[in-house]
Image (cartoon, rainbow, N blue to C red):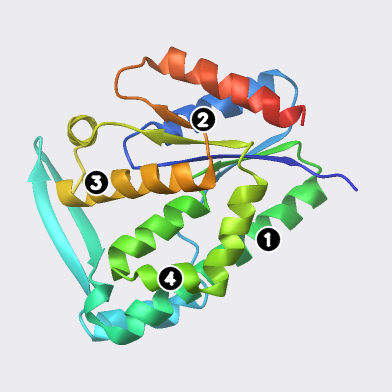
Amino acid sequence: MFKPCIFFFSGVDGSGKSTHAKLLRVYARKKGLKVRYMWLRWSPFLTYILLFYSLIRRRTLKITFTRRGRRYTFKVHVFWIDPVLKTLYPRVFLFDSLLRYLLELVSSYMGHLDLIIFDRFFLDIIIDLLWETRNTAVFRYIEVKAVLGLLNKYKHCGLVLFADPLMIINRKADVISFREIKFKCNVFKLLTRVLNLEAIDTTSVSISEAFNIVVRRFHECVHE
């Protein structure tokens, strides 16, 4: 059966995921491959029920601030203060994300694509959920075990990108919390070691140097 190659980019916002994912899409197309680019951040289906609940209970807050002359508005989840959301939201959102992933696979099979590039993958989703719920018990959930199995399956076909939190603040004007960035950087580093994933620290390397590593990793993946 025809099977497309999957390549993912994970890492904290501002580390260069989208930049390198889009560069890889251009590179792969020049090689004659049929490519799909997928930004795996927001895939709510059943999750909409819990999001409606969070609005009623005021567990989703609207924050507006101005930085560098530009106005930003965000919805911030404070799900850790609500027992229902703290327990159910990770499970339901991961189920929805797995469903979106499977739909993408089916669509790619039908379209006979050669490559799917995921900008953000399940590692990013797990870490986002940890921050929003402050619930380390998620690692015992069957949904988390399923996505960790996928990460292990694709660990040779992806990269985790890091950067110094202070540099990220300078790169991205829409960062709300330095504490959040620092927390996520530390958890990404920990899980990258535990899962034996390859990482690039983009703090002190140029885009071209980092992309050379991406290309090398990509060819290793394609020829496995």
Q: Which residue is drawn at the image coordinates 17% and 50% (left, top)?
A: 179
Q: Nearer the viewer, mark 2 or mark 3?
A: 3
Name the residue that disc number 1 marks: 102
Check disc 4 and give the amino acid type.
Val
Badge 4 element: helix
Name the residue that disc number 3 marks: 181
Name the residue that disc number 2 marks: 22
Give the mark, 2 or 3, whose residue is nearer the N terminus: 2
**Image spot of residue 128 (x, y percent):** 36, 58
Q: Residues within 10 Å of mark 2 (few under 14, many from 20)?
A: some
Name the residue that disc number 4 marks: 138
**Image spot of residue 180 (x, y percent):** 22, 52
**Image spot of residue 100 (x, y percent):** 60, 62
**Image spot of residue 137 (x, y percent):** 40, 73
Estimate the spatial distance between the alpha carbons at disc 3 and disc 4, rounded to whole Å. 20 Å
Check disc 1 and give the amino acid type.
Leu
Residue 166's mark?
A: none
Q: Which residue is drawn at the image coordinates 48% and 75% (left, top)?
A: 91
Give the mark, 4 or 2, whose residue is nearer the N terminus: 2
Residue 177 visible in the picture = no
Which quarter of the rendered picture does the C terminus lie within? top right
Q: Residues within 10 Å of mark 1 (few under 14, many from 20)?
A: few
Estimate the spatial distance between the alpha carbons at disc 4 and disc 2, rounded to whole Å. 31 Å
Check disc 3 and give the amino acid type.
Ile
